[in-house]
Image (spheres, coloured by chain):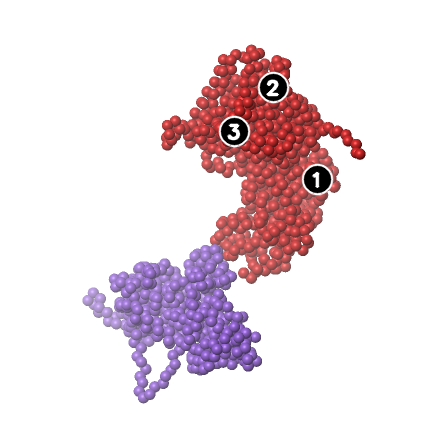
Amino acid sequence: MAMLLRVPEVAAGATSALLTEWLIPENTRFAAGDPLVVLETDKAAVEIEAETGAVLLRTLVPGGTNVEVGVPIAVLGEEAEAANLDAVLAELGVSGGAAASSGGGLAGGDSAAGAGSAPALVGGAPVGQSAAPVSGVTVRPGGAVAPGGSNGEAQDVSSSAGRIFVSPLARKLLKEAGIPAERVQGTGPDGRIVRRDVDNAIATAQAAPAPAPAPAPAPAPVAEAAPPRPVRTGFEEIPHSRVRRAVARRLTESKRDIPHFYVRRAAKADALLALRKQLNEVTPVKISVNDLVVKAVANAHLLVPDANVIWTEQAMRKYSTVDIGVAIASKKGLVTPVLRGVDKATPSAISRQVKEFARQADEGKLNQRDLDGGTITISNLGMYGVDEFSAIINPPQSAILAVGAAKEVAAVHNGQISVGTRLALTLSVDHRAIDGALAAQWMAALVDTLEQPLKLLA
Amino acid sequence: MPTRETLAAAAPWTALTTTEADWDAAAPGLLLGLFGQATWIRAFEEYVLELAAEGLVHGPAHASIGQEGGAVGSVLPLRSDDFVNGSHRGHHQFLAKAFTHVLPGDGLPSLTDEVRTVLRRTLAEICGLAEGYSGGRGGSMHLQWKAAGAMGTNAIVGGGVPQAAGFAFNQRRAGTDAVTVTYFGDGAVNIGSVLETFNLAAAWKLPLCFFIENNMYAVSTHVSDATAETRLSARGPGFAIPSWRVDGMDPLAVQLAMTEALEHMRAGNGPAIIEADVYRYFHQNGPYPGSAFGYRSKAEEQAWRDRDPIELLRSHILRRSLATASQLSVFHDEVVKTLREIGDSFLQADPAGKPGQRRIKASAWPDPGFVDVGVRGDLSELDGSRYEEVSGFSGELAERRFIDVVSDVLARRMETDPRVVIMGEDVHRLKGGTNGATKRALELFPDRVLGTPISENAFAGLGGGMAIDGRGRPVVEFMYADFMWVAADQLFNQIAKARHMFGGHGSVPFVLRSKLAAGTGYGSQHSMDPAGILTTAAGLRVVAPSNPFDYVGLMNTALACEDPVVVLEHVDLYTSSGVGPVSDLDYRIPVGKAALRSVGDDVTVISYLSMVRHCLEALEQVGIAADLIDLRWLDRASLDWDTITASVRKTNKVLIVEQGARGTSYGGWLADEIQRRLFDWLDAPIWRVTGGEASPSISKVLERAATARTEEVVTALRHIAEY
């Protein structure tokens, strides 16, 4: 029986999406779970996976087309039905004429192949469940979400009405656990968050991840100084991956729309390195310098809460929890997952969570909700020997901290020259949200914490 | 050509008129007593109207001015152990009964301290003040002073009459020759409660006098508009009740008729009717004459005033030189002065009002915190009870048929408590009533198992009267729960409210057995579950035993409790068997204690009565682990919130299961209460299983479709499992 594939609601409230490409050509058989098509919104690029196996009989919309939610984009069925497809379409209530535009499609194999390299982040988010009827075929978004695909706003996971449904008990438990409802996937009727969802969320937050290789904090793509590849005679054109496109667009927007300014400090790192050594003697998880920096940033946010803000057109949004993004260069690209409630987390818990994020990113299993929120991101290129650098803010956050290498330097103190280890820090700040003096105060708090690292354990 | 024979009613119907000789023969003390009390009553009523005109009486003031002759003529022959009750227009009879109770003898009465207290407390009650007999709750229309035999006036026309039969029942059963007089007007003589009670009192030969004050107007409707036989005592012979008709403006005639009626009643010959033609000089209520409202003429009013009962007494007293005019004048002035003193003690100048305007002193009002005090008793009567549950039961247990333990425990209580009397339709026949509930009681105490006429309002009200008096513990049976609508006034307006309305202190140990019969094919008017309706009445306790063991313990508690308790029984359970006591029929189960029938974490299922078994069956089929709470006590005051709260906090999900139609269902208010008390513990909406929208039909398949049983619970549980 032929069925129509319709555009699901890719993200809450989204009424349309860009159909960027078909991932399989017409008249190709696919299995359940195979990605069929890529839909992109300003928040996400999502691979739509097949719910059941069938044949893509005809695409109704070519790649590069903007499509409304609910519109039919393809006919799925069995080979036998291909012969009189127009009749089938008429039966399904779709004019044959509309279907005629498919033709060449975007069967660009490179694109299809490229899809595989995207960090697949979320599976099974029910964002499409309440979307348009799909004539018996249910699809679920299974594609990738580009880095920075967060806007810090409440993600509607239940309906287009713009609110999250939570049972009274679940609401209470969420509050007690300090977990925003936005970060929990509801599995009750109509996506309502019920007790088991909260229980799962708490368990996930607390569970120690399986031992994983320590991820190397990776170069942030948001670094400014990425020189173009030298080209001499002729060149090779490498098609953009969706991640590449999204990074490009968002960082362009960031640099265009956000008035950046920069504050630089160097922190004495000797005590910090000594503490790390001590910690690693007693904790089962290997704690990195970066993990301690993450904790120190949280501490600075606590000391200077006015900096824990983001700019929105309507109002300044000041957060009561400290959520911090970390840039991770995964096998599938760069991602910036967000650590929650870092102010209450121990360095070892931070370390475990970062490792877990890295593992998930490598496997393409990061959740969209892990990418949302936060007021600041930390990008660390110290392991590449970078002295210092400036980074581009990851919208809608208000700051990004670029961390260079810890290096021995000759330092002058009270007229005496001595040798010490210094960590170079550059904070990029959104001037709409944070003024220079406030940024300086915050930086002072950060440096103070790094230089007296026992504060991290207090 | 048929032959004809003129028939005569078995009971006499007599018009009694006094002659000059009767007035000459009347004892001086009697005439002075009649005059004195009538004068006090009129002065009192005139003062009430004065206060009403000042806006100081909240609600209606139904003045009896003009009707005093009927009251004093009928009350003076009574003793303190004789009872009266009355209607909305009852100040005069209440005062006469109270005066007679506190006065030492006959003759022109003196304003003793006791009399002043009667005046003071009555006035306070009418004004709604704390010093009133009912703490101001009852007001003008609910005057009760049980110690004086004044059992309560009533704002429902005819509503007090069935209870009077209950008082009379107790008086006779106590072995006394005391009687009850129930007062009502021409407007009440056509209402079912009154006619049903005529019949019941006559059938059971109760010492009850129906005293009809025929003042010709039900508000503005003339008696001839309302009935073809305007001589209202004519109804008596139709019920084989000896009846008297007298001129109520002639207090001596009333006194003579009552004396004859008392002789008849005290001799054990059954009830009597006295119709007294009287006239209220004013409108239904307030200080204006009826003619001002256009339904009668000034000339008619003047004609009746010319026959004023107090003037008649005065003229004979002066004629016989029993007192001087100035003595009588001084007597009148004294009570007027006393009433003003009493009134002044409640009142003060209103600083916000016009000059001379008064208001009630703040200190005289009841405390607003008194509003719900005494809706029901404090259960202290159950102190020292031996409470038992199946687990740990000290006696012997066996598989018992439900209906057998019903029969056994009722008989056992009759054995230990001579106050217990069973009444209902057919309970005295069929070897134990329609279902066998009175089998054992009939074997042991046949004279205490009373088959009633089919008149639920009368026999429920009679039971209520027995309970309000307190010397009887009625167990009233409604053959079908739906019949509560027929008796709704007695059950809801009278029995359920009596304690609170009369000040919150009088107990009402009334037990109603109400039988649910959905599934028997008796159709729309015999198949309801009354729990939802019964529990709207604050004064009623409602208990729903689901098994033989519980029935014994809960019935024992119900019969020991001083509050009215409705015991729900389901026909499905009668023939079922379950664990019950072999011989120990004396244990109780506490008020307000539910039972957990199964334990589980998935959901809290709340049910009662026959649906408990259906829930257990459903849980087995679905394989959900549930707390199954058998509520046992359903009314809001007796609900076991501890058990419900602990369970909901554990499971976070609630299913309320009942059998009957949605409109009258019980679970709605419970769900409402749970969501308010336990909102933060709920992980899902509160689910409910009920019957359908309409009442069950007679057709077997339609009846099945309209009621909930195991399958409906299974469906609900499956839904919950998927939640």
Residue A365 is tagged as none
Res B427 label = 1
Single out the mark in the foreground, 3 or 2. 3
Residue A197 visible from this viewpoint: no
Q: Which chain is red?
A: B
In this figure, which residue is indicated by the disc labeled 2?
A: B252
Chain identity of mark 2: B
Q: Chain of mark 1?
A: B
Q: Nearer the viewer, mark 3 or mark 1?
A: 3
Q: Is disc 2 placed on a helix, strand or loop? A: helix
Q: Earlier in the sequence, mark 3 or mark 2?
A: 2
Which residue lies at the image location 49% right of the left edge and 15% below the top edge? B329
Residue type at numbered disc 2: Leu
* Image position, residue B299 (x, y; %): 53, 24
Amino acid type of the residue tagged 3 in the rendering: Gly
Disc 1 is placed on an element classified as loop
| Mark 3 vs mark 1, CA separation in Å | 49 Å
